[in-house]
Amino acid sequence: MELGPRVMDGVNAVGQHPRTRDDIKKRWNDLQGKVSAHQKKGIWRAIAKEVRTQGVFDRRSTHCLKRWEDLRRWARKTAEAQLRLAFQ
């Protein structure tokens, strides 16, 4: 398997070999028409979780990370507010 420029650092949560963005896309495309929407949702969630922890995709590349970015932004703002209160 040819590893492109976007390779996960180390191994993923399942302990498999590093996977590129293309590998994930290929897996997703292989599943089209073979699994139910419910199963796809679970698989997509697992991929999203893996992506969040490994940081393969950039922000714009997949919709599933949008909420994660919002959550991080909220957490950062909250932390900054707490620090400001502490050092008034």
Image (tube, grey):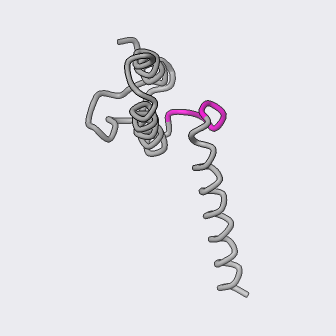
Report the side of 34 relative to 57 (left or right): left
Residue 31 rendering spot, x and y as whole percentages: 40, 19
Residue at 61% across / 36% down in the picture? 63
Residue 14 rendering spot, x and y as whole percentages: 28, 38
Please state, as top left, top right, bottom left or bottom right, where the N terminus lies in the image: top left
Please state, as top left, top right, bottom left or bottom right, where the C terminus lies in the image: bottom right
Report the side of 75 relative to 1 (left or right): right
Residue 71 rendering spot, x and y as whole percentages: 60, 57
Residue reaching furthest right?
88
Location of residue 22 with respect to 40 vertically, above or below: above
Residue at 47% across / 17% down in the picture? 4
Segment tinted magenta in the rendering: 56-62
- Asked if the stretch drawn in magenta spans residue 58, the answer is yes
Q: Residue 74 or 11: which is nearer the viewer?
A: 74
Report the side of 30 relative to 65 (left or right): left
- The image shows a total of numbered marks equal to 0
Location of residue 14 with respect to 81 vertically, above or below: above
Residue reaching furthest left?
15
What secondary structure is the stretch in magenta mostly built from?
loop
Residue 83 rendering spot, x and y as whole percentages: 65, 78
- Asked if the stretch drawn in magenta spans residue 45, the answer is no
Quarter of the rendering containing residue 9: top left
Location of residue 18 with respect to 26 vertically, above or below: below
